[in-house]
Amino acid sequence: MRDSATTEPALAPRLPGLWANPDFVKLWSGQTISELGSRITREGLPLAAVLVLHAGTVQMGFLTALGGAAVLVFGLLAGVWVDRLRRRPILIAADLGRAAILASVPVAAVAGVLSMGQLYAVAALAGILTVFFDVAYQSYLPALVDRDQILEGNSKLALSSSIAEIAGPGLTGVLVQLITAPIAILFDAVSFLFSALMVLLIRKPEPPPVRREPEHLLAETLAGIRFIFGNPALRPLALRSATLFLFMGFLGPLYVLYAIQILHLRPVVLGFVIALGGVGAMIGSVVAPRIVQRFGLGATFVASSLVQGLTSLLIPLAGTPGMAPAFAVACLMVPQLFGDMAFMIYYINELTLRQQVAPEQVLGRVNAGMQLLARGIWPIGALIGGSLAAAIGVRSTLALAATGVVLSTFWLLASPLRRLR
């Protein structure tokens, strides 16, 4: 007589967590590919301006500022739309729109009619659609997965961004070298088509928007900001975010200049240092759920904020006169690896908290408000940082920026949030 265990069919191994949710896997797959494509455009659009159209510093500054301007001008409006309409159609429309807009760059390049005016328009329009997509997908996730899986979902979606940050710059360099910068942007257009298809294939029905009493447009637009600053958990996070991105804006336009012209790093070394940031972010996206389960939410926020701030102090320290080049490289590697890891741990838990505490009918506007206080503040910091560098020097400006990043933790320490489990 044969053993009964040998007569029963072997059970297929069960995938862990959200990997067993086919609808989430579709969203994750689309985001992973489109994030990689977006890194190609992030590097490829400026390269097209410089290598093909020979843009000057003023033109490059304007091209860079247009993305941040989209958040400032359209961020809160995107929140109103996301709360009024179903989120999934907004995701699909934003992906299809970005695909069409970006495809115009290689088409114009092949036709020999590419111009800076077109690149300005592409940067502005793609930036606007990205604002709508980001607000919609942050608001859509709680409707796609169970409430106790939101943190896991945010962690896995952040992993996509981290992978793209590691692979994207190198892939862009290869594509630009082989097929030129404008043609490389075609890959991003295709990636958005893939993302739209994945979202379209999601089968779980999205609940209709919550009906609410008609409001004056201004009051409706500002409802998210009012909720953020009226909520004792979100208010310190918002104040910390605004402070952080103001001072991080100082770093943005000066970091590469500082590394190349003052620290005299070779581009290949700088590329390796920057890639470590992607590695750190990837590690952070994986360990974020475990960290908060082990230490609690408040302690995780405070510790990750302090790690990001304290490691950023090493950036101006890298320029200490008389130090060996290896010292400068090490000073830049630490904040890239550990600072970006801490930032990702903080970001994933901050996003999860607001998705859980904000009511469904205002979630889109809350996400838009937090985005405004981050990405919308950054270009203001960049303008201030550039002016300060001209007045007091690059290294002094970077020291001021790092100090501001450290001090941004004050908003968390001074609030009851630090005790939140």
Image (cartoon, helix red, strand yellow):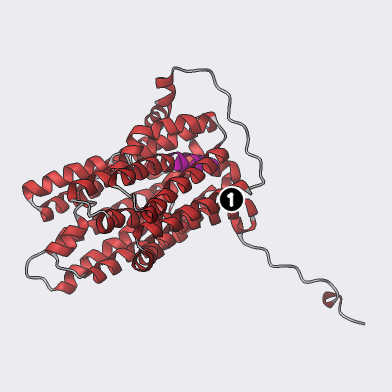
Q: Is 34 or 380 nearer to us in this picture?
A: 34
- Residue that sits furthest to the front in the current view: 111
In the figure, is residue 126 to the left or right of 393? right
Q: Quickly name the residue at label 1.
A: 197
What secondary structure predominates along the stretch shown in magenta?
helix
**Residue 143 visible in the snapshot:** yes
Q: Quadrant of residue 230?
A: top left
The amino acid type found where label 1 is placed reads Leu
In the figure, is residue 95 to the left or right of 255? right
Q: In percent of the image, x 54 and y 33: which residue is there?
A: 360
Give the residues drawn in magenta, as a range.
132-140
Secondary structure under tag 1 reads: helix
Q: Quadrant of residue 52?
A: bottom left
In reply to whether residue 150 is colored magenta, the answer given is no
In the figure, is residue 160 to the left or right of 144? left
In reply to whether residue 135 is colored magenta, the answer given is yes
Q: Quadrant of the N terminus?
A: bottom right
